[in-house]
Amino acid sequence: MNTADSGPLDRVHRLPSWLIAQASAHSHRLVSDAFAAAGSRGYHYRLLAALDQFGPGSQAELGRRTGIDRSDVVAALNELAAEHLVERAPDPADRRRNIVTLTPDGARRLRHLDTVVAGVQHDLLAPLSPADRDRLVDLLARLVDHHAKTG
Amino acid sequence: MNTADSGPLDRVHRLPSWLIAQASAHSHRLVSDAFAAAGSRGYHYRLLAALDQFGPGSQAELGRRTGIDRSDVVAALNELAAEHLVERAPDPADRRRNIVTLTPDGARRLRHLDTVVAGVQHDLLAPLSPADRDRLVDLLARLVDHHAKTG
DNA sequence: CTCCCAACGTTGGCTGAGCCAACAATAACC
DNA sequence: GGTTATTGTTGGCTCAGCCAACGTTGGGAG
């Protein structure tokens, strides 16, 4: 973000879409900084979380579960495998597939990232009271829900 | 966004930071589609708005007012100038500067984009009642405000 | 069994918004 | 006068998301 404006740009700074974009930018900075400090990226967290929640699966399944494109799954898994957080083995029952498994190290990393993420949520919502945080989450959830179905 | 998940990724889909990112993604899609249909981009709108609100100014001033990087201002102004929405003239009082001015065509385009933007806000907030829209805007404004100062 | 279509992993590339570094020209200050 | 700052510009980088193409492999229809 570029600091030091000379007064607000009225037409823009009041738009809901602008506020959402700003909030997202700040949020994204917090999240990616925190992930970077933990040696990971958002994609890693999503993939580890999916493996933990759904168990081992093919890369295509992982992509569907996390909403990450097949091609991006490949790269992220390469990085996770290089750190031994994940294991990639050919599926004997279907030679097109790789079966991806969470290693103990991966589970450990996931738990650590959980705490990192929780800390970020805390910082992000710091200016809001608990009741306001709930309100914000509820409003955003309704917004996202609507556009997920409609869009 | 990737449709067709197989159930929610619990760890991720409840995070406030995730909801904000999702809302921002949907919002951004609406905005950029609408701008594209009007033959413009977000940068164009911001620059035209700044010229309208603050009057003519140098490119560096425009960058400061809109929060757009100097280098990106150059490109966006090239595009605006190619459409004669903006005029770029050397400043006789300071030969480093260009003075950028909004043309009548530019003012017209800005007015059109205003209506486009208003339509997008309407679509974006469609699922919320007027009172909820106000609440959301208020909460987001407080969030953004806090993180802009804390930064 | 054969043919065709679908799914898989992978490579490579593209977009958009936001940054940052460097440069020559010019201005401003001590 | 000599140093520092500002300006316009070029070029490049990141990060998330997406899409096209390829060769491989499975599975269903005839």
Image (cartoon, coloured by chain):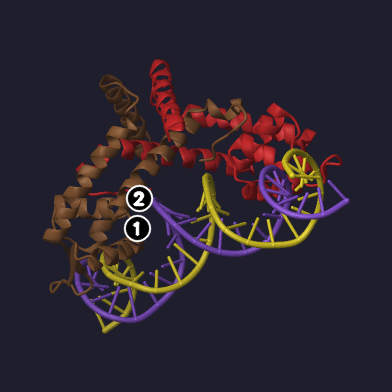
Chain colours: A red, B brown, C purple, D yellow
Q: How crowded is mark 1: few (under 14 residues within 10 Å), some or many (20 or more)?
A: some
As rendered, which of B7 and B85 lies closer to the eye? Answer: B7
Point out residue A49 in the picture as x, y percentages from the top left corner: 66, 32
Outermost residue on the left side: it is: B104
Q: Residues within 10 Å of mark 2 (few under 14, many from 20)?
A: few
Query: Quick check: A61 left or right of B98?
Result: right
As rendered, which of B95 and B122 lies closer to the eye? Answer: B122
Placement of the C terminus of chain A among the 4 image quadrants:
top left
Q: Give the labeled residue for mark 1.
A: B69
One can see residue B50 in this view? no
Chain holding disc 1: B
Point out residue B132 in the picture as x, y percentages from the top left corner: 31, 21
Quarter location, residue C11: bottom right
Query: Quick check: A14 left or right of B136?
Result: left
Q: What residue type is labelled 2?
A: Asn
Circle 1 SS class: loop
A56 vs C7: above or below: above
Mark 1–mark 2 Cα distance, whole angstroms, equals: 8 Å
Q: What residue type is labelled 1?
A: Asp
User: Mark 1 and 2 residues: CB-CB less than 8 Å, in contact?
Assistant: yes
As rendered, which of B100 and B122 lies closer to the eye? Answer: B122
Asked if badges 1 and 2 are on one and the same chain, I answer: no
Residue name at image x 39 percent, y 40 percent: B151
Q: Give the labeled residue for mark 2.
A: A2
Point out residue A33 in the picture as x, y percentages from the top left corner: 53, 43
